Image (cartoon, rainbow, N blue to C red):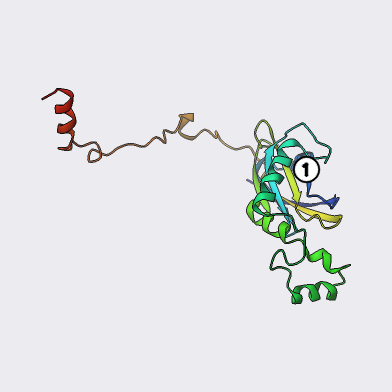
Amino acid sequence: MEFKVYQKEIELQSRGWIPTFHDVTEEIEKIVAASGIKNGTVTVASHHTTCSVMIQECSHDVDTFDLEYLQHDLLDIMRKMIPDFAEEHQYRHPGPIHAQFGRYVNEPGDYTSMNTDGHLRSVFFGRSEAITIKDGVVDCGEFAHVYFIDWDHVRARRRQLNVTVMGTTDDVEDRKWNNGEVVDTKRRYTPEEKAYDVHYELQWRRGKNV
């Protein structure tokens, strides 16, 4: 059985002024097809600390902010938890040393470090997702899409998404676990948990008007 690793980088352009949601589902599917890997996993990972990767349903409806309704609902929730960076000293970060570092690496202005909201939001969602590949097909489910989210909205920026496909070019055996029987996860009480308790007598007597 041959094991193979295939890597590609996707370049994206975020717009700034509002978080950008990039639907990269088609690109991921094409990369997996080009890899020749039939069974394995594809890992989709952000190159940036203010960005996330998310697997979620396509919401279809798009508003005037060019966001799908579900994306905007998500953004509204994140704004309640982690408000947009709207004024100086709203957050501890960035401090004076970090601002100086930005100047040292030729950032265009101190304002580019006013992206604490993006850093905090990316922590909640994480920077990567791993997806199963079955028979050459990315198994996202019936309705799911892969989104790259750029939470940093202080300016328009070029972004990079890293894609690593790993697996085999061979077929695999039957995937059904335990012949496909449904796993019963309901709680099973022990005999001790179901044992008689003397306090039951009070209820029984009351019911029998004893």
Residue at 24 percent of width and 36 percent of height = 194
Name the side, left or right, on which 208 lies relative to 178. left
Q: Quadrant of residue 58?
A: top right
* Furthest residue toward left: 210
The residue closer to the viewer here, 3 or 210, is 210
Q: Quadrant of residue 50?
A: bottom right
Please state, as top left, top right, bottom left or bottom right, where the N terminus lies in the image. Answer: top right
Residue beneath disc 1 = 24
The residue closer to the viewer here, 149 or 162, is 149
| Secondary structure type for disc 1 | loop
Q: Give the residue type that dot 1 points to.
A: Val
The residue closer to the viewer here, 47 or 70, is 70
Name the side, left or right, on which 186 lies relative to 36. left
Image coordinates of residue 203 in percent, x first then y, are: 19, 30
Image coordinates of residue 135 in percent, x first then y, are: 66, 35
Image coordinates of residue 22 in percent, x first then y, are: 79, 45
Image coordinates of residue 136 in percent, x first then y, are: 70, 37
Q: Quadrant of residue 84?
A: bottom right
Residue at 71 percent of width and 68 percent of height = 93
